[in-house]
C-alpha cells in the first residue's frame, strides 16, 4: 500500500511541473527552401514571417495567421 501511494504522489508532482512550458523555438530547419508567397504569420516569439515555411525554417513551433500587432 505504501508503494502505491508513493507512486501516485510521484505522478502527481511530475504532472504538475509548471517549469516546463512547451518551447516556442527549437532548432531550425536551415536547409529548407521556402517559396516567396506572402501569407504572413505571427510566430509565438512575436515576429512576423512571410509565411509558415519561414517560421518553421527558423524553428518556430506555433504561430497564428496574419502579421503581429505592435
Image (cartoon, helix red, strand yellow):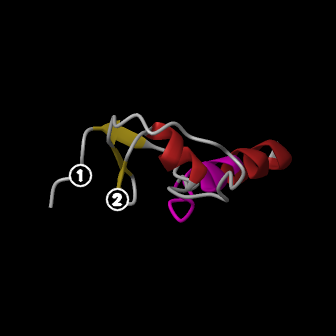
Check disc 2 and report the residue beneath it. Answer: 47
The answer to whether 51 is drawn above or below residue 69 in the figure is above
Question: Percent from the top left, x then y, of residue 34?
Answer: 56, 40
Check disc 1 and report the residue beneath it. Answer: 68
Residue positioned 15% across, 61% down in the render: 70
Quadrant in which the N terminus is drawn: top right
The answer to whether 36 is drawn above or below residue 25 in the figure is above
Q: Earlier in the sequence, mark 2 or mark 1?
A: 2
Residue 2 visible (yes or no): yes
Callout 1 crowding tier (Cα within 10 Å): few <14, some 14–19, many ≥20: some
Q: Are marks 2 and 1 in contact (CB under 8 Å)?
A: yes
Residue positioned 23% across, 52% down in the render: 68
Residue positioned 62% across, 56% down in the render: 13
Disc on res. 20: none
Query: Is 16 part of what is drawn in magenta?
Result: yes
The answer to whether 64 is drawn above or below residue 46 in the figure is above
Query: Is 29 part of what is drawn in magenta?
Result: no
Residue positioned 32% across, 41% down in the render: 40
Question: Percent from the top left, x then y, of residue 16?
Answer: 54, 53
Q: Residue furthest bottom?
A: 19
The secondary structure type at the circle numbered 2 is loop
Closest to the observer, 15 or 46: 46
What stretch of residues is rendered in magenta? 11-21
The answer to whether 53 is drawn above or below residue 16 in the figure is above
Query: Real-space Cα distance between discs 2 and 1?
Result: 6 Å
The secondary structure type at the circle numbered 1 is loop
Residue 61 visible (yes or no): no
Closest to the observer, 38 or 24: 38
Question: Percent from the top left, x then y, of residue 39?
Answer: 33, 34
Amino acid at each position: 500500500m505504501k508503494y502505491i501511494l508513493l507512486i501516485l504522489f510521484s505522478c502527481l508532482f511530475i504532472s504538475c511541473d509548471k517549469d516546463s512550458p512547451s518551447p516556442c523555438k527549437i532548432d531550425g530547419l536551415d536547409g529548407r527552401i521556402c517559396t516567396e508567397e506572402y501569407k504572413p504569420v505571427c510566430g509565438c516569439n512575436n515576429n512576423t514571417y512571410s509565411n509558415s515555411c519561414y517560421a518553421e525554417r527558423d524553428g518556430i513551433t506555433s504561430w497564428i495567421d496574419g502579421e503581429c500587432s505592435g
